[in-house]
Image (cartoon, grey):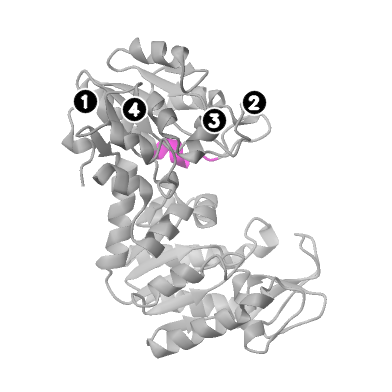
């Protein structure tokens, strides 16, 4: 794998695809800068070598036209403080202004381009658009793992314009090394913890993991589909009725392959999807009519914690309940704590993007686990397919 460590950027302009798709509040303040902090080492490597930096990213999902709330100008001050140096901003990602600002860059200087997705050509993977972007740098660095599963202009198509001058940044290199460690060099027992809302969103990853894991823990909204499939009463809990057969197949596959599967035995059920709703802890197979399960219960927490404690490799993707609500976050917090304890005892723990990262950050535990992935969708697709467009483009 060719990374920034294998390249001397002295006198070069590095065009770096970063993932600065960070959450902003109504005043455009960054509420979680994990992805920005992750990119700093790669930027600093270029600068330390004596190079200049041109950063390109997307933010949100604009409708292929400029939108104020998705402008990357909102992150310039934060990025400048994070780097300890001023960051120039180009009000467009292509065109004469972007070219002139890039051309004027001196070693040690940093330029941030406007949101790539203000052009539909970015997500369409248009070659002419990628070529215009490529004109802004001498060497291409892909450090945006969170978008590496998209064959977009800036993540995959652009690499062809840098034969011999394309490398991975530290985020990409670390993400790939971490995933490969879990998938190919995992110490046993290997436990996968999958949560979130729907079975349909996780079925492919379950299929791929089934031949690699010893234990599969099911939590979150998807658990109720498994319970109903086995004849349980789930009240008004979230259920995918068209996936009941899929859930039963997962159970039979696990049995056939000797994988221990753990499904919640109790649940914290509420009278409404609201933090102040009436709540009760019940057997998950007997949720009262009019109540919905929003978290795992204490017996399940204890059972899951024991499995996690006995594990040597842990992959976690998806919360155990509606952790955004304080009354239904206990199960997710308990799982987080159990993973931290196992890590302290020598287990390797990979937190797999998305809501799992939000939970780990909420509880200030990011530094207590082995690795926190910056890209949930990319991580899942890499596990499912074994590669990503943004990875293949650099490795060609």
* Residue 111 screen position, x and y as percent: 40, 20
For label 1, the residue is: 9
Marks 2 and 1: in contact by CB < 8 Å? no
Q: Is residue 172 magenta?
A: no
Marks 1 and 2, how far apart at CA:
34 Å
Marks 2 and 4, how far apart at CA:
24 Å
Q: Residues within 10 Å of mark 4 (few under 14, many from 20)?
A: many
For label 4, the residue is: 15
Q: Residues within 10 Å of mark 2 (few under 14, many from 20)?
A: few
Marks 3 and 1: in contact by CB < 8 Å? no
* Residue 204 screen position, x and y as percent: 47, 69
Marks 2 and 3, the one that precedes in the sequence: 2
Question: Can residue 269 be spotted in the picture?
Answer: yes
For label 2, the residue is: 68
Marks 1 and 4, the one that precedes in the sequence: 1
Q: Which of pointers 1 and 3 indicates the residue nearer the eye?
A: 3
Marks 3 and 4, the one that precedes in the sequence: 4
Secondary structure under tag 3 reads loop
For label 3, the residue is: 119
Report the residue at 20% width, 42% height from top: 2
Query: Residue 26 versus residue 337: which sits nearer the camera?
Result: 26
Marks 4 and 1: in contact by CB < 8 Å? no
Secondary structure under tag 2 reads helix
Magenta-highlighted residues:
32-38
Marks 2 and 3, how far apart at CA:
14 Å
Query: Residue 395 versus residue 362: which sits nearer the camera?
Result: 395
Q: Quadrant of the C terminus?
A: top left
């Amino acid at each position: 794998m060719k990374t920034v460590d294998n390249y001397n950027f002295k006198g070069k302009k590095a065009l770096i695809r970063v993932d600065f798709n960070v959450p902003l509040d109504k005043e455009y303040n960054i509420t979680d800068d994990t992805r920005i902090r992750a990119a700093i080492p790669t930027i600093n490597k270029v600068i330390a070598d004596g190079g200049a930096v041109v950063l390109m990213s997307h933010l949100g999902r604009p409708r292929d036209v400029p939108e104020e709330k998705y402008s990357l100008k909102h992150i310039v001050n934060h990025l400048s403080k994070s780097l300890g140096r001023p960051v120039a901003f180009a009000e467009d990602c292509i065109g004469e202004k972007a070219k002139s600002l890039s051309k004027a860059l001196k070693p040690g200087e940093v330029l941030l381009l406007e949101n790539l997705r203000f052009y539909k050509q970015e997500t369409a993977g248009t070659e002419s658009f990628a070529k215009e972007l490529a004109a802004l740098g001498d060497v291409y660095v892909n450090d945006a793992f969170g978008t590496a599963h998209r064959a977009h202009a800036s993540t995959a198509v652009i690499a062809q314009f840098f034969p011999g001058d394309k490398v991975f940044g530290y985020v990409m290199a670390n993400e790939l090394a971490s995933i490969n460690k879990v998938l190919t060099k995992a110490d046993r027992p290997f436990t996968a913890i999958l949560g979130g809302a729907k079975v349909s969103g996780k079925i492919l990853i379950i299929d791929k993991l089934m031949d690699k894991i010893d234990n599969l823990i099911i939590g979150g909204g998807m658990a109720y589909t498994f319970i109903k499939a086995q004849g349980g009463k789930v009240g008004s809990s979230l259920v995918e009725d068209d996936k009941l057969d899929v859930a039963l197949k997962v159970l039979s596959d696990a049995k056939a392959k000797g994988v221990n599967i753990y499904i919640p035995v109790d649940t914290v059920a509420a009278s409404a999807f609201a933090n102040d709703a009436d709540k009760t802890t019940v057997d998950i197979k007997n949720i009262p009519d009019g109540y919905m399960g929003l978290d795992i219960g204490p017996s399940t927490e204890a059972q899951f914690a024991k499995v996690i404690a006995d594990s040597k490799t842990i992959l976690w993707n998806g919360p155990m309940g509606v952790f955004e609500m304080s009354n239904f976050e206990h199960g997710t917090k308990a799982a987080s704590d159990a993973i931290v304890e196992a890590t302290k005892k020598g287990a390797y723990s990979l937190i797999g993007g998305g809501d799992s990262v939000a939970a780990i950050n909420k509880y200030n535990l990011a530094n207590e686990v082995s690795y926190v992935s910056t890209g949930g969708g990319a991580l899942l697709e890499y596990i499912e397919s074994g590669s990503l467009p943004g990875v293949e483009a650099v490795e060609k």
